[in-house]
Image (tube, grey):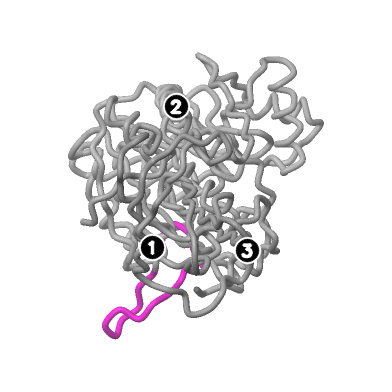
């Protein structure tokens, strides 16, 4: 490893001769003096230099004396530098990465993502995303969960019908997994509490600002629950942990994007689906985007909460493995978590008895054979359990107020985009 001091640490080394390394973020050559602004993973540092300077996005290693300067980033700068160029760019970037505001439209950014994402404002959502994942893991680890890794190539499209990507698997058909749902339920029988962070694939021809063909799903499943409310309580702790991690790990990214992070109430307000219907004057079996926005605004007005649980969705709108409400079998022990006007998380209690699965599949006219591998766990005894799934890119987009989910995705895959 190159022995160096990170730019964020330079203020601790005033008067010392140190080495930094990174990219030339900005080059300014004046008559009497010239400046380089160097960018590394922690921030920016100014270097006072003379003579010909390397161009922007050159990779450099610079050794100099740290001096206090109120005009420089971080209040310090390097003087009397020795500059070594480690690599030079073969072409200029598609737009000036030193501009305080991104001077490019989203298609240009996505077409040139490997270099465009170097811009601090375009990198910031990815820092928030990474901090969110770290918080997800930390929160669930504290609650006794075990991280698992499940297959993304599956033999049948049992859970989702036509909305899957088919692939040729050594001469026979297979599919990219839409969800780790079946596997994480099976692993409740092994570890009781499990979670996974991984890609899922949706072959849905949506060309919208909120849909991707591949996204990162944060999944959790836990056994020995009384009902879906136990799952909701764990989800509340998880979301709070994710936000705390963002505050702690991505403070500079939050500040650069001027994000107002929400508070998570000690108990997130919850309403039943039938109450949501009454409040929005609807008799539809699901909530529209406009109704989700209205309900979220109501939660802010009435409860001061950016979060709202809607429970008890009709069984007809939930997967076959969803546990019905014992008091109202037409409704489910399932829920959605709305966040700032958008459904963010879907979850609920699952069926856990083998005979209930046979009955549920029969009611929907589904054959048992394609589900044999899935049902194996239930044939040998499973506890009452439930879980949830959260889309990472959608979460980050709502946190930062992004108008397009692609702004929170390094290399998005959608109806039209398969590269870079």
Give coordinates of residue 33: x percent, y percent: 56, 55
Q: Residue furthest bottom?
A: 171
The magenta stretch spans which residues?
A: 158-175
Give coordinates of residue 84: x percent, y percent: 34, 65
- Left or right of 184? Residue 289 is right
Residue 96 is labelled as 3
Residue beneath the point at 52% across and 66% down: 56
Point out the tag, 3 or 1, that comes first from the N-terminus.
Answer: 1
Nearest to viewer (mark 3 / mark 2): 3
Q: Please rate how many residues cluster around mark 1, counting C-alpha atoms within 10 Å: few if below 14, some from 14 to 19, many from 20.
A: some
Q: Secondary structure at mark 3?
A: loop
Per the image, the residue denoted by label 2 is 244
Give coordinates of residue 283: x percent, y percent: 76, 37
Q: How many marks?
A: 3
Find the distance from the CA under tag 3 to the CA under tag 2. Answer: 33 Å
Per the image, the residue denoted by label 1 is 60
Point out the tag, 3 or 2, that comes first from the N-terminus.
Answer: 3
Point out the tag, 2 or 1, that comes first from the N-terminus.
Answer: 1
């Amino acid at each position: 490893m190159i022995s160096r001091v990170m730019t964020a640490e330079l203020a601790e080394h005033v008067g010392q001769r140190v080495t930094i390394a990174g990219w030339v973020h900005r080059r300014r050559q004046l008559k009497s003096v010239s400046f380089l602004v160097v960018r590394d993973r922690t921030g920016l540092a100014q270097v006072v230099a003379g003579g010909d300077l390397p161009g922007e996005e050159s990779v450099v290693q610079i050794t100099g004396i740290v001096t206090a300067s109120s005009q420089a980033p971080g209040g310090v700068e390097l003087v009397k530098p020795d500059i070594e160029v480690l690599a030079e760019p073969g072409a200029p970037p598609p737009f000036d990465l030193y501009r305080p505001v991104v001077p490019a439209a989203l298609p240009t950014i996505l077409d040139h993502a490997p270099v465009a994402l170097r811009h601090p404002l375009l990198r910031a959502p990815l820092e928030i995303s990474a901090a969110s994942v770290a918080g997800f893991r930390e929160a669930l680890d504290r609650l006794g969960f075990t991280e698992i890794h499940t297959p993304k190539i599956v033999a049948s499209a049992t859970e989702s019908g036509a909305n899957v990507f088919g692939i040729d698997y050594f001469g026979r058909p297979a599919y990219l997994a839409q969800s780790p749902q079946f596997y994480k339920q099976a692993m409740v029988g092994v570890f009781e509490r499990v979670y996974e962070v991984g890609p899922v694939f949706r072959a849905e021809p949506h060309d919208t600002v909120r849909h991707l063909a591949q996204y990162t799903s944060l999944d959790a499943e836990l056994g020995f629950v009384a009902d879906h409310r136990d799952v909701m309580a764990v989800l509340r702790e998880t979301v709070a942990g994710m936000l705390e991690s963002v505050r702690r790990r991505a403070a500079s990214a939050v500040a650069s994007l001027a994000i107002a992070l929400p508070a998570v109430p000690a108990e997130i307000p919850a309403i039943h689906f039938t109450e949501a219907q009454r409040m929005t004057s609807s008799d539809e079996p699901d909530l529209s985007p406009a109704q989700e926005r209205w309900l979220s605004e109501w939660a802010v007005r009435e409860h001061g909460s950016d979060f709202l649980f809607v429970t008890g969705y009709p069984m007809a709108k939930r997967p076959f493995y969803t546990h019905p409400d014992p008091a109202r079998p037409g409704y489910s022990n399932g829920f959605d978590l709305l966040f700032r006007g958008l459904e963010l998380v879907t979850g609920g209690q699952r069926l856990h008895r083998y005979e209930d699965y046979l009955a549920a599949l029969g009611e929907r006219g589904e054959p048992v054979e394609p589900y044999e591998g899935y049902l194996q766990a239930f044939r040998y005894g499973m506890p009452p359990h439930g879980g949830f799934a959260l889309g990472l890119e959608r979460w980050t987009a709502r946190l930062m107020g992004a108008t397009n989910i692609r702004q929170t995705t390094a290399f998005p895959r959608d109806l039209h985009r398969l590269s870079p």
